[in-house]
């Protein structure tokens, strides 16, 4: 294979990673590609852990790991058309173990230099506190490695970056989407806003518990998206692509200008289908968040207009907890967040099941995978002809 073709394929593989679909890379393997791509993340996480053990100021605890990630990334991601770093099985194991040792032993050494940072003398003798820090560091490293491995394997970080762009675009277009969704979601949530028992519940419920409820509802959106996409009858790629379709899909990609005859789109492997599902789920969550933000602002405004402080005290049964925002009851913000999340989940699921809403909100998201799959077809054709 010529150097120019190899460089084009390498840039295309990076394009798949940036498109949140790394599993479309040919021969994508955990040891060869996932662990090398995790090196910047593991480096930043390790530095952050050591700074936390050393009780560094919050600014430095966040700034220094970001600088480390920015410095390491070019050497592992590949620059100027060079192939990104790849490791064999032994190399991947060595990298994983080295970071684990630094996490555990490095944390213990930092604690020895600055004892008492974690106040572990309450649960362990001073002589064993460093060993306890090492054990805690090892447990945290396993969790960080597992989470980073899954996120890197299925392009979660890139999908979140795209979701932020979708969120910004959606917020700019929120009058249209909010106007379409408001009648649907208010039908099932508006009467709950004036329920005294909910005001009592939210006044007593702590913010961490409220956030746990929001996370649970986000999981429901994810499961609903997976069910709908897995059972979807139509092919999101559409009819067999022509040469013009492939050329249009490759525009503004590393494969731009590559002549490719009409080719059959091969079925995706299971891991690639899973990657597509992850991308679509994150984008659906972004849509739900757009609606949720609008509903949250609506319910807060509604409460400020209609619910006086005395009314809230009557519903709750005592003087409600006041917030720092002009003494507005904290329960109003908690209840608005809860109902907004209900509305976001309701609209997200209806956009996948209601025929009218599906055409406007869900099908564009579903069809968004057409382009990378067509690019993948050209990519595989180049690989087969090398």
Image (cartoon, rainbow, N blue to C red):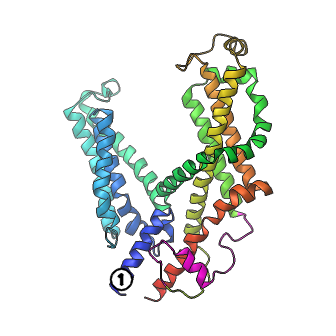
Instruction: Name, please, the residue furthest toward the left.
Output: 113
Residue 255: say if magenta: yes
Residue depicted at 57% across the width and 34% down the height: 211
Percent x, y for residue 328? 60, 18
Q: Does any portion of residue 295 appear in the rendered image?
A: yes
**Residue situated in front as seen by the camera: 259 or 345:** 259
Quadrant of residue 217 within the rendered picture: top right
Horizontal side of residue 354 vs 274, given as left or right: right
Name the chief secondary structure element in magenta. loop
Residue tagged by mark 1?
Answer: 4
Span colored in magenta: 231-258
Note whether 338 is above or below 280 in the view shown.
above
User: Tag 1's secondary structure?
Assistant: helix
**Residue situated in front as seen by the camera: 346 or 362:** 362
**Which quadrant of the figure contains the N terminus?**
bottom left
How packed mark 1 is, by other alpha carbons closer than 10 Å (few <14, some 14-19, many 20 or more), is few
Residue depicted at 73% across the width and 21% down the height: 306
Q: Count the labels in the image.
A: 1
Horizontal side of residue 171 vs 344, given as left or right: left
**Residue situated in front as seen by the camera: 350 or 114:** 350
Percent x, y for residue 41? 36, 53
Q: Does any portion of residue 269 appear in the rendered image?
A: no
Residue depicted at 51% across the width and 65% down the height: 21
Percent x, y for residue 343? 70, 40
Note whether 336 is above or below 67 in the view shown.
above
Residue 45: say if magenta: no
**Which quadrant of the figure contains the C terminus?**
bottom left
Note whether 354 is above or below 120 in the view shown.
below
């Amino acid at each position: 294979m010529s150097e120019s073709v190899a460089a084009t394929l390498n840039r295309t593989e990076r394009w798949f990673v940036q498109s949140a679909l790394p599993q479309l890379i040919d021969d994508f393997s955990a040891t060869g590609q996932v662990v090398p791509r995790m090196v910047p993340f593991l480096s930043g996480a390790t530095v952050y852990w050591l700074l936390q053990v050393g009780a560094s100021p919050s600014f430095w605890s966040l700034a220094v790991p970001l600088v480390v990630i920015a410095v390491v990334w070019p050497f592992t991601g590949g620059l100027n058309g060079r192939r990104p770093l790849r490791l064999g099985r032994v190399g991947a194991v060595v990298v994983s173990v080295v970071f684990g040792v630094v996490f555990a032993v490095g944390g213990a050494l930092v604690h020895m230099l600055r004892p008492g940072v974690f106040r572990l003398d309450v649960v362990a003798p001073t002589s064993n506190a460093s060993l306890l820090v090492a054990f805690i560091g090892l447990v945290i490293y396993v969790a960080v490695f597992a989470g980073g491995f899954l996120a890197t394997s299925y392009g979660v970080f890139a999908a979140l970056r795209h979701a932020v762009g979708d969120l910004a675009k959606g917020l700019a277009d929120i009058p249209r989407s909010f106007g379409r969704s408001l009648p649907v979601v208010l039908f099932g949530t508006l009467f709950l806003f004036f329920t005294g028992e909910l005001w009592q519940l939210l006044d007593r419920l702590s913010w961490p518990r409220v956030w746990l409820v929001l996370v649970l509802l986000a999981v429901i959106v994810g499961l609903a998206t997976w069910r709908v996409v897995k059972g979807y009858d139509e092919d999101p790629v559409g009819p067999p692509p022509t040469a013009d379709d492939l050329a249009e899909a490759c525009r503004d990609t590393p494969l731009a200008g590559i002549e490719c005859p009409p080719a059959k789109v091969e079925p995706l492997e299971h891991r690639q289908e899973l990657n597509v599902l992850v991308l679509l789920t994150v984008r659906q969550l972004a849509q739900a968040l757009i609606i949720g933000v609008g509903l949250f602002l609506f319910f807060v405004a509604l409460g400020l207009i209609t619910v006086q402080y005395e009314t809230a005290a009557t519903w709750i049964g005592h003087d409600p907890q006041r917030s720092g925002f002009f003494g507005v009851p904290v329960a109003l913000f908690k209840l608005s967040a809860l109902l907004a999340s209900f509305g976001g989940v309701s609209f997200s699921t209806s956009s996948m099941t209601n025929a009218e809403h599906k055409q406007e909100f869900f099908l564009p998201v579903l069809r968004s995978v057409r382009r990378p799959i067509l690019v993948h077809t050209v990519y595989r054709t180049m690989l087969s002809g090398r």
